Image (cartoon, rainbow, N blue to C red):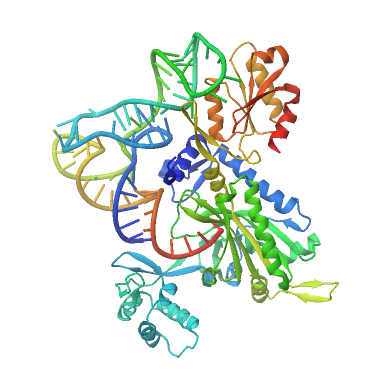
RNA sequence: GCGAAAGUAGCUCAGCUGGUAGAGCAUCACGUUGCCAACGUGAGGGUCGACGGUUCGAAUCCGUUCUUUCGCUCCA
């Protein structure tokens, strides 16, 4: 199998089998948006249910919620997204490379920084970080004139180490903006949430008091989030509309280190529990330079796609940043009273934040296999039975002698407990292969012996081996195979 | 957004220098077969991404636009 084309293979398989279609396809498609078809949505629901069960249902001290996507704009002012969730970018016109201005400044000779601060800043700033930030702010403020200032400063391209021909500084705001109400004016601006987490933070008090949870405890949520990413791609890996599975764990500020470690391993194990090859999963600690504005420590769960190791989930120590900010901006007290220790404090937060769509891409990429069987190629999705869109497919060996009726009765009975599929079309081998490609772990065939002794064959997708099972024991046999 | 490449049937693609569309697979029907992508016959499915131009004539040449892929930047 050509590794370089895994994404192409999955894109095409997804469309053919009904996992994932490009959005608005009949109108030429809309960039980076995808629709889940009949098999895709089953897979997605199974993954989300699995997350919900293992993060919330199974735990006494984690509860769920579902916040609205639209929130008061002050939420994003408080969270820092309005100020920080954008990138100042400049392009080198000579070699067409694009850079983040703030990263670029860190790589400049003193002469460039001196020129910029002399030209732009009215007073001397000691801290280098603050100086850079002030320069960025000023360059953004002067708009188109930033082009001439940058070029006069002789700012170099870090690759060539030479002054380049720069464009003006442009802001890329990563939040989707919309308007609420009938009139579009500045007072009606609202944002589509760029993360579900803030819906949890602003409900901290509501949830804590109504659920009577004591610290440490968590609040989890699954929902859509929107980011105006500059570059999207790799199928459903990076899209502008995506779904998150997030959990915010509120604990004592002295204990974040311990809980960060705990949740990091819990989350890595969750991905392993989806049946993903664990040699392709790893944890990676963030360096200081890549931490988000709210975070003091962060681990990524990564999977080795054919386009490289990529992040599936971030587990971050957000400290008391979010509750502090919301307390400050809202004027509401968002602290916790620990009765036994007679102590008031603002809880710190350890966050687990996973992408639903990335989890789906991961299980698909990991499950896809091309095998040789008797000289023929077999495409098979070795999805865990826990998440496979169809659990069991039922076939009559022949479309006569009463076999279709028996098979139809079996599938009707199974349907109430298992996602089932009935197929009479084509040879039995072809039907098995179709289900292999859809990731269905089990196949049941009604054959001649069924007419004699009421048994059917139960086929295992991965080994292709069959065992005979009495029809009245089928439910138990399937339960055994899928647990 | 910038640069490069691409867009022809559900999927993967062919179609040379302009002469009004093909293959393999897939789908459906009928017949035959009956445990791992069988065979036969037949059918459906494309205004060749869209719009405009050149031309007697455009999938093919030119322009614009949309979309996708890769890279730069960012993130779940």
Q: How many marks?
A: 0
Residue at the image point whose x is 42% and y is 75% from the top: A140
Quarter of the figure that contains the N terminus of chain A: top left
Along the line of sight, the residue nearer the viewer: A465 or A480: A465
Quarter of the figure that contains the C terminus of chain A: top right
Along the line of sight, the residue nearer the viewer: A406 or A436: A436
A423 is higher (above) or lower (below) than A48: above
Where residue A14 sits: x, y (%)? 50, 39
Q: Quadrant of residue A461?
A: top right
Q: Is residue B18 left or right of residue A152?
A: left
A257 is higher (above) or lower (below) than A448: below
Examine the rendering and report whether any part of residue A203 can be seen.
Answer: no
Residue at the image point whose x is 62% and y is 54% from the top: A223
Examine the rendering and report whether any part of residue A159 can be seen.
Answer: yes
Q: Is residue A456 left or right of residue A178?
A: right
Where residue A358 sits: x, y (%)? 55, 51
Along the line of sight, the residue nearer the viewer: B76 or A202: B76
Furthest residue toward right = A340
Furthest residue toward bottom = A123
Q: Quadrant of residue A439?
A: top right
B29 is higher (above) or lower (below) than A45: above
Where residue A40 sits: x, y (%)? 56, 41
């Amino acid at each position: 199998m050509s590794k370089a084309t895994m994404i192409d293979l999955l894109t095409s398989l997804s469309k053919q089998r009904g996992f994932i279609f490009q959005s608005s396809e009949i109108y030429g498609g809309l960039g980076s948006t995808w629709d889940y078809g009949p098999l895709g949505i089953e897979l997605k629901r199974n993954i989300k249910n699995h997350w919900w069960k293992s993060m919330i249902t199974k735990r006494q001290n984690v509860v769920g919620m579902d916040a609205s996507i639209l929130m008061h704009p002050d939420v994003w002012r408080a969270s820092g997204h309005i100020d920080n969730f954008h990138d100042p970018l400049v392009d080198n016109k000579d070699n067409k490379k694009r850079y983040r201005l703030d990263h670029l400044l860190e790589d400049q000779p003193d002469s460039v920084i001196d020129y910029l601060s002399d030209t732009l800043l009215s007073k001397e700033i000691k801290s280098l970080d603050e100086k850079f930030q002030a320069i960025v702010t000023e360059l953004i403020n002067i708009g188109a004139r930033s082009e001439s200032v940058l070029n006069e400063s002789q700012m170099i391209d870090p690759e060539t180490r030479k002054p380049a021909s720069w464009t003006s500084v442009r802001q890329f705001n990563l939040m989707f903006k919309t308007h609420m109400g009938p009139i579009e004016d500045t007072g009606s601006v609202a944002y589509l949430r760029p993360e579900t987490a803030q819906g949890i933070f602003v409900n901290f008090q509501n949830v804590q008091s109504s659920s009577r949870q004591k610290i440490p405890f968590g609040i989890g949520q699954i929902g859509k989030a929107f980011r105006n990413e500059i570059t999207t791609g790799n199928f459903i890996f990076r899209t502008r509309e995506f779904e998150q599975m997030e959990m915010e764990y509120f604990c004592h500020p002295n204990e974040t280190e311990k809980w960060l470690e705990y949740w990091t391993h819990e989350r890595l194990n969750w991905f392993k529990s989806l049946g993903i090859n664990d040699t392709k999963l790893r944890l990676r600690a963030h360096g200081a330079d890549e931490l988000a504005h709210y975070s003091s420590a962060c681990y990524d769960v990564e999977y080795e796609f054919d386009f490289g190791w990529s992040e599936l989930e971030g587990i971050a120590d957000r400290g008391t940043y979010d509750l502090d900010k919301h307390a400050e901006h809202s004027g509401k007290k968002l602290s916790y009273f620990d009765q036994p220790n007679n102590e008031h404090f603002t809880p710190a937060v350890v966050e687990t934040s996973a992408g639903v769509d990335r989890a789906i891409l991961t299980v698909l990429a990991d499950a896809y296999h091309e095998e040789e069987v008797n000289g023929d190629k077999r495409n098979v999705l070795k999805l865990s039975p826990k998440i496979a869109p169809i659990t069991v497919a039922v076939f009559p060996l022949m479309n006569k002698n009463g076999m279709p009726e028996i098979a139809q009765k079996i599938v009707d009975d199974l349907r109430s407990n298992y996602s089932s599929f009935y197929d009479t079309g084509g040879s039995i081998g072809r039907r098995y292969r179709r289900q292999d490609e859809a990731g269905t772990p089990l196949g049941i065939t009604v054959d001649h012996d069924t007419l004699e002794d009421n048994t059917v064959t139960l086929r295992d997708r991965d080994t292709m081996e069959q065992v005979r099972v009495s029809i009245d024991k089928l439910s138990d046999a399937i339960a055994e195979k899928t647990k």
